[in-house]
Image (cartoon, coloured by chain):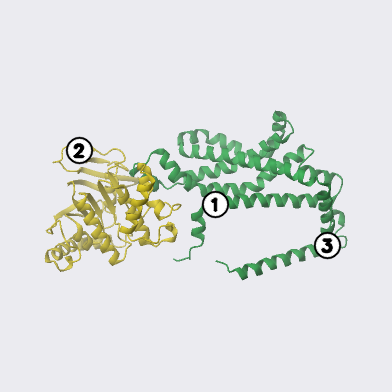
Amino acid sequence: MSMAGPLIAFRKAGKTFHVDGRTVEAVRDIDLDVARGEFVALVGPSGCGKSTLLNMVAGLFQPSAGSITYAGTEVVRVNLKTGYMTQNDHLLPWRDVVGNIQVPLEIQGMPATQMRKRVASLIELVGLTGFEKSYPAQLSGGMRKRTALARLLAYDPETLLLDEPFAALDAQLRLNMQIELLDLSRRLNKSVLFVTHDLDEAAALCDRCVVFSPRPGTIRKIITSPLPRDRNLIRLRHDPAYQALAAELWDLITPTLALTRGEAG
Amino acid sequence: MRKAGQSLRLNLMRCALLVAILLTWEMASGVVVAEFFVSKPSAIGRALGSWLAGGNLFFHIGITALEAFTGFFLGASIGVVVGVVLGRIHILADLLHPFIIAFYSLPKIALAPLFILWIGIGIGMKITLTATVVFFLVFLNTYTGVRNVSRELESIMYLMGASERHVLTKVVLPSAITWVFAGLRISVPYALIGAIVGELIASNRGLGFLLANASGQFDTAGVFAALIVIMMLSFLLNALVRAAEIRLMPWKSAESQREVTI
């Protein structure tokens, strides 16, 4: 494995689904390299196949055209180097908050005392103190999201595949989670693929931002962020470089809005 | 959550309704309908009392309970195991599908004569009959439950590095347990059917024998008394299943206590 090469490489990758006799081409001709430790945001209209790309990096299914390699190896089965967090939190309804967060630790076979400590610190990190014994059905949408994030952080995967992870959170909490995520990904040199509909969020977090066309999704433009890797998210609003980046994203996305209006989700 | 006062009032009203029914029955018997057909609560009470005094009521209850509970436990255990195995191994399930449906469509009671040929008319026959009836109900429910496990949840687990065993114990079994209990709950009366029918066909003990014996002597009060005891046994088995359900699925009670929001 060469450290110099990209961590994730899409080569002419495409995916076509066959549903009820209909053929839907989700993405086409994707060429993209993601370096180790890089934070890449994926933005574009609904249904342009951003989630499909994450699924393929995770190895949940294979591209129907082209290839995807991870650390120099083609992804053909479940990719254990990646951690996935989707729009849906996918918590286990029969486990309380603590039980859900410790699932990956149980799988790793971590000793019970160490596991308790780790889970306690994660619960504090995501601000769920006092809800340790609550079941998912008793939590709000935001709290479920935070539980899912804590579970993702618990098993500490090399690459984070995040599909609108903060969409359900209120503004303050979202900012807090963004700060935590950015700090964590920098400190531990995590690679992040971050799908979002929130262009300001994409501009604030990314090293590079990939803008997609409507379905079948193709890459329209890749923008490299002018912001430093070490950035202060709270002060960002007043940064002209950030404002220019967000504005550029808006200008790219708005013309395609008319095409996808009326298409749900 | 219902308030304590409300639930007390509900229970009082239930008692009043029961008393009213018993009183109407008592007075209508012999006036509107011949006592021979419907007996009357006081006579049924006397029949129960004499069985209790005779001391062999508990013997008969014990026999039927042993058959029903053992058969229930056996059938349910095998049903869960087979349901999980076929639910996970799709090729096996596809292979066996027509055979299972063929057996399922057979009324299990019709197997009783075969079981008598094989194992005689003792307790074993009633247990086997009960277990067969319960097996199919629990098996089909477990199978459906295992097949309904969210594929997304499984994928998330595999991404965490889970083995097949992890997925089974952490996702598949807890997820299917709701269905298992649905199967167990509908199986309770059928467990009693297996035991009682077995006793009706061939037996000299148990509640089914008591029932058949009273009927043979045109003792309507005895028939009703036996039915009441059978009902109580079914009630007990039901309560046991319910208690196990609350104990094994704490998240369900948490969900039902949640305030409804949209």
Instruction: Identify the image quadrant of the C terminus of chain A.
Output: bottom left
The reply to the same-chain question for discs 3 and 1 is: yes
Label 3 or label 1, whichever lies nearer to me, is 1
Q: Is residue B91 visible?
A: yes
Which numbered tag is attached to residue A72?
Answer: 2
Instruction: Identify the image quadrant of the N terminus of chain A.
Output: top left
* Mark 2 secondary-structure assignment: loop
Q: Nearer the viewer, residue A256 or A168?
A: A168
Mark 1 surroundings within 10 Å by alpha-carbon count, few (fewer than 14), some (14 through 19), many (20 or more): few
In percent of width and height, residue A168 lies at 33, 62
Mark 3 surroundings within 10 Å by alpha-carbon count, few (fewer than 14), some (14 through 19), many (20 or more): some
Q: Quadrant of residue A233?
A: bottom left
CB atoms of marks 2 and 1 within 8 Å: no
Q: Is residue A57 left or right of residue A99?
A: left
Q: Which residue is mark 3?
A: B26
Which numbered tag is attached to residue B114?
Answer: none
Q: Which residue is mark 1?
A: B247
* Mark 1 secondary-structure assignment: helix
Which chain hosts label 2?
A
Chain A drawing hue: yellow
Disc 2 to disc 1, C-alpha distance: 50 Å
Identify the chain drawn in green.
B
Which chain hosts label 1?
B
Disc 2 to disc 3, C-alpha distance: 87 Å
Q: Nearer the viewer, residue A129 or A81?
A: A129
Which label's residue is closer to the chain start, 3 or 1? 3
Q: Amino acid at mark 3?
A: Glu
Q: Amino acid at mark 1?
A: Arg
